[in-house]
Image: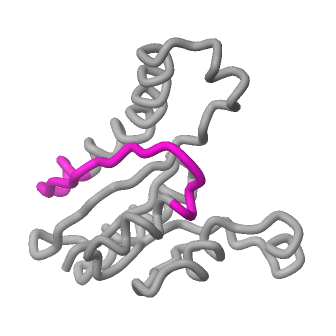
């Protein structure tokens, strides 16, 4: 099974990984894992004054801060995972990548109530609305 893990380096990502580690059906050598992290875009006015190399370095460094501990987690499990650092809105990025042949999206959720989701929105809610791929939310 091709599994897309949406990660952001938060405690919710750690909780998601702990859940996966506790359930053999989700974590094992019979699955193919891809970690995706969407780095928010630098505001256009700021990006306009930065050279492309500096901007790319910022995006790469931001993604690597998230991926480094996750690589260690997968190495301890004896598994490998592909890391994709993308720029842009998280929900759009996750849904677009999932549409490229993934069987499952796994992501941590903050677990906000209905009112908070209505006011603030939620990456998890947006992903659910944008994709036909099954989503496993871990709270």
Q: Quadrant of residue 133?
A: bottom left
- Range of residues picked out in magenta: 74-92
Q: Could you say which is closer to the camera, residue 137 or residue 97?
A: 97
Q: Position of residue 93 (x, y in %)?
A: 48, 58
Q: Position of residue 88 (x, y in %)?
A: 55, 47
Q: Residue at x 48, y 31 (%)?
A: 62
Relative to 41, 37 lies left or right: left
Quarter occupied by the N terminus: bottom left
Q: Could you say which is closer to the camera, residue 74 or residue 116?
A: 116
Relative to 76, 23 lies left or right: right
Q: Residue at x 85, y 75 (%)?
A: 118
Q: Residue at x 60, y 41 (%)?
A: 40
- Above or below, 121 relative to 39: below
Q: Could you say which is closer to the camera, residue 93 or residue 16?
A: 93
Look at the image and say whether residue 88 sits in the magenta stretch.
Answer: yes
Question: Total of numbered circles in the picture?
Answer: 0
- Above or below, 9 relative to 115: above
Q: Position of residue 33 (x, y in %)?
A: 23, 63
The structure's colour scheme is one colour
Look at the image and say whether residue 80 sits in the magenta stretch.
Answer: yes
- Above or below, 74 relative to 123: above
Q: Position of residue 14 (x, y in %)?
A: 47, 55
Quarter occupied by the C terminus: bottom right
Q: Could you say which is closer to the camera, residue 131 or residue 108?
A: 131
């Amino acid at each position: 099974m091709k599994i897309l893990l949406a990660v952001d380096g938060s405690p919710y990502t750690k909780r998601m990984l702990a859940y996966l580690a506790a359930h053999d059906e989700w974590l094992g050598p019979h699955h193919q894992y891809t970690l995706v992290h969407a780095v928010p875009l630098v505001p256009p006015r700021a990006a306009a004054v930065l050279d492309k190399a500096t901007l790319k370095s910022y995006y790469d460094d931001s993604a690597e801060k998230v991926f480094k501990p996750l690589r260690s987690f997968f190495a301890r499990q004896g598994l490998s995972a592909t890391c994709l650092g993308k720029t842009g809105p998280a929900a759009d990025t996750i849904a677009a990548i999932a549409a490229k042949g993934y069987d499952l999206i796994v992501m941590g959720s903050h677990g906000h109530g209905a009112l908070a989701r209505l006011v603030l929105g939620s990456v998890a809610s947006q992903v659910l609305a944008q994709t036909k791929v099954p989503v496993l939310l871990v709270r």
